[in-house]
Amino acid sequence: MKKEKKGEEMKKNIGVVTSTYPNFNGSEAIEGISKAGFKYIELASAPAYFEHVPRPENGVTKEIVDGVLKECADHGLILQCIAGHTRMIQENTVKNFMKVLDFANLAGVNFVTTDAGEVKGKEDEKKFYSDIKEIADYAKDKNITVCLEMHGNWCNNGKVGSEIIKTINHPNVKLNYDTSNVIMYGNARPEEDLQYALPYMGFVHLKESGNGKFGEWNFPALGEGVLDFDKIFEMLKQFDGPGSVEIEFDGVERSLDEINEAVRKSYVFLKNKGIVE
């Protein structure tokens, strides 16, 4: 009984981000995530990489958004986040990101995740901070929280990310803590690093690490790697926000069936831990 109580305390709105499905379309991702048992989804909109919603820059209409929401609902899924990556540190960053926020707003979505872009020097930092503050003000008007992911060499772990959030100093910009990107990019273990991010988090990506090695792209199904998720879940009791599972295999192209099986295994893992229904 005591174990069940702990599970009840830990249950969160955990879905799957569709970047788990490279080389497959949004409909295939939606179907696989639904069949695995998940109830929530994060749709990826990263031009030239993952376009699982119609590209917002090409126009955002109620008809387009309603079509996406209907497809999710028809599969028993709630759209809780848009992954709007690859737009920061670009020529039209603010304009393009605002379109993503427009899409999220029409969809009734309160979270948009993003990387910080390729920040390589002081001029890039200056542009990032200028752009993100303008984006944040726009997001505030729409009740959306923009969540910066640990991705790349600049915003690469929780300790560094927390300082970036403090510098931005805006209530509508928080962290999207990625439990394995902090290893790959930031050479930090989430079991130790998560504590720095917790006060500044708006979203979380639960991602397994196949071998725990810095710089290596290897993110299998949850429970099939080296992360101590019992410790991570215990720490996440302090975080009351939603999140997504993300699976990115070791650089080898996988079949749709293989990805679906990894998503299914991740759902079973989370259910056995008392994290999802």
Image (cartoon, rainbow, N blue to C red):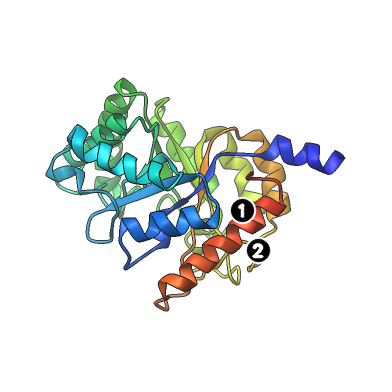
Q: Residue at x 66, y 45 (%)?
A: 275
Q: Secondary structure at mark 2?
A: loop
Q: Which mark is residue 223?
A: 2
Q: Which mark is residue 276?
A: none
Farthest residue to the bottom: give it.
Answer: 252
- Is residue 153 among what the camera can see? no
- Is residue 39 among what the camera can see? yes
Residue 137: image location, x then y, percent: 29, 24
Q: Residue at x 55, y 39 (%)?
A: 13
Labels 2 and 1 touching (C-beta < 8 A):
no
From the viewer's side, name the closer residue of 261 and 212: 261
Farthest residue to the right: give it.
Answer: 1
Callout 1 amino acid: Pro
Is 253 displayed left or right of 39 in the figure?
A: left
Quarter of the image with the C terminus is top right
From the viewer's side, name the closer residue of 55 and 218: 55
Q: Quadrant of residue 120?
A: bottom left
Residue 51: image location, x then y, percent: 26, 55
According to the picture, the residue beneath numbered tag 1 turns out to be 190
Q: Give the answer, above or below, for where 160 lies relative to 216.
A: above
Is 189 displayed left or right of 109 in the figure?
A: right
Residue 165: image location, x then y, percent: 44, 35
User: Number of labelled discs?
Assistant: 2
Nearer the observer: mark 2 or 1; the answer is: 2
Q: Residue at x 47, y 61 (%)?
A: 185
Q: Secondary structure at mark 1?
A: helix
First along the sequence among labels 2 and 1: 1
Q: Residue at x 49, y 62 (%)?
A: 247
Callout 2 amino acid: Gly
Is 38 displayed left or right of 105 in the figure?
A: right
Farthest residue to the front: give it.
Answer: 74
